[in-house]
Image: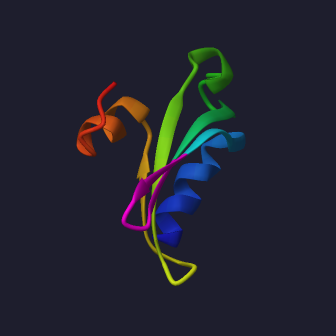
Amino acid sequence: MTESWRDFLSAWEDFHGEVDEYRELGDGRVLVFVRFRGRGKTSGLDLGHTRAQGAHLFRIRDGKVMALVLYLDSERALADLGLKE
């Protein structure tokens, strides 16, 4: 996992996410909506202009993260969780 994440990040300049919203779903689940920022090193694509939004689903037990699911598309996260707005 570390190697895959490192490969993904190496394609970007200053890739990061900014939190838009935290949503408690119950059963120790928290959905965090994020906006992605960064510029592609090769393509020059600026994610800030694409309004790229994702979500991270945390499963928490006893104050520890037990699982993390990363979604690059927040609509997909909502659909997978049966929360489509």
SS majority, magenta: strand
**Quadrant, the N terminus:** bottom left
Looking at the image, residue 53 sits to the left or right of residue 47; the answer is left
Q: Position of residue 24 (x, y in %)?
A: 49, 52
- First to last magenta residue range: 23-31
Q: Residue at the spot x=35%, y=41% of the render?
A: 77
Q: Is residue 37 magenta?
A: no
Closer to the camera in the image, 12 or 20: 20
2 above or below 31? below
Determine the image quadrant of residue 75: top left
Query: In the rendered image, which quarter is residue 16 located in?
Result: top right
Tell me the quadrant of the picture where the C terminus can be found: top left
Return the residue nearer the eye: 28 or 36: 28
Q: Is residue 67 visible?
A: yes
Tell me where residue 3 appears, x and y as whole percent. 51, 68
Instruction: Reply above or below: 27 against 20.
Output: below
Q: Give the color scheme: rainbow, by chain, secondary structure or one colour.
A: rainbow
Q: Give the camera-side residue of 85 and 68.
A: 85
Residue 44 in view (yes/no):
no
Q: Is residue 68 above or below residue 35?
A: below
User: Residue 36 at what x, y percent from top left?
Assistant: 62, 35
Of residues 22 and 26, which is closer to you in this image? Answer: 26
- Asked if residue 7 is positioned above or below residue 59 in the image, the reply reads above
- Residue 25 is covered by the magenta coloring: yes
Residue found 52% across the figure and 84% down from its top: 62
Q: Residue at x 43, y 67 (%)?
A: 28
Q: Residue lying at the far top in this picture: please name it.
A: 49
Q: Is residue 82 left or right of residue 16?
A: left
